[in-house]
Image: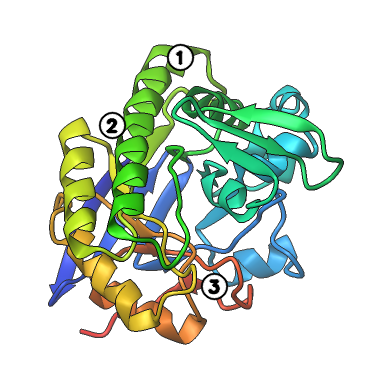
Amino acid sequence: MSISFEIEATNGAARLGRLTTPHGVVETPVFMPVGTLASVKAVSQDILEELDVQVILGNTYHLYLRPGVEQVRQLGGLHRFMSWPGAILTDSGGFQVFSLVDLRKVTDDGVVFRSHLDGSEHFLSPEKSIEIQQALGSDIAMVLDECIEYPADHARAVGALKRTTEWARRCRDYAAAHADASTTPEQSLFAIVQGGTHADLRRESARQLVDLDFPGYAVGGLAVGEPHELSCEMAVAAAELLPKDRPRYVMGVGLPEQLANFVGCGIEILTNYLSIEHDCGRLVYAA
């Protein structure tokens, strides 16, 4: 693995740990500021460094559309492009495509979508998502998954779960086959647990993805309209079946005051696309 994760202490399901990446150590639990377009909005880099931010999120969908993957690659990858020395995790673009409900079509092959910038048509497959993330050179890349709406019935969630597992397999295989050609060959790939708000499907998704053996796992498809308590229930259902020695990331969850609840669910890495972006840095661990 190109990352390593060590648990230093526990308190119930909550874990205090150290995630070692090619660009430094991330002390967990950690809140990861969102730098969607290679910049954290309204927060200068000197403030991020003053706050001891250790990892930032970049986004495949937005960087692909603007400024473009080749431009970032030619400038040495995302770390050099944004002059960030710490760790970077890139989102696969799945959530952004999900939000383009009137501009996209999902099939087993991938997603056809229209740019929110100019209406141009694009195709994002699992392989294309990894190709982009390898060019960006992030430390951690995310598989392409199918994020679904809330509420979604059991049958709808089953379909998305099956597609997410198959896309995870395709992402894994493509990443392994093309690692040597990427900007960051040591990039690690995290899978994403789906299943809507159905606990049995969350557990089944976790089981299927664990069988594929990823360096880390995320819980996706939350904070899309469901009550916070239900979000936590789904996080617990997934986390209980994820490997104890791998980092866990809950994607795009709710308000800043709710983040500690997810740490109590056994999650290490948290981010919030709608949060106040200066509320970042390591979360306080309650021993």
**Cα distance between the residues tagged 1 and 3:** 34 Å
Q: Horizontally, is 123 left or right of 159 in the view?
A: right
Sooner in the amino-acid sequence: mark 1 or mark 2: 2
The residue depicted at 83 percent of the width and 40 percent of the height is: 119
When the figure is inspected, residue 14 is found, relative to residue 218, above or below; the finding is: below
The residue depicted at 22 percent of the width and 54 percent of the height is: 201
Classify the position of the C terminus by image quarter: bottom left
Residue 133 visible within the image:
yes
Report if the CB atoms under discs 1 and 3 are less than 8 Å apart: no
Q: Horizontally, is 232 left or right of 65 in the view?
A: left
Residue placed under numbered mark 1 in the picture: 178
What is the x, y in percent for residue 19? Answer: 33, 52
**Cα distance between the residues tagged 1 and 2:** 16 Å
Residue placed under numbered mark 3 in the picture: 280
The residue depicted at 46 percent of the width and 38 percent of the height is: 144
Q: Quadrant of residue 3?
A: top left
| Nearest to viewer (mark 1 / mark 2) | 1
What is the x, y in percent for residue 207? Answer: 15, 45
Helix, strand or loop at label 2? It is loop
The residue depicted at 38 percent of the width and 36 percent of the height is: 189
Nearer to the camera, 83 or 71: 71
- Give the amino acid at mark 2: Met
Nearer to the camera, 151 or 65: 151
When the figure is inspected, residue 252 is found, relative to residue 117, above or below; the finding is: below
**Cα distance between the residues tagged 3 and 2:** 27 Å
* Protein image colouring: rainbow
Residue placed under numbered mark 2 in the picture: 1
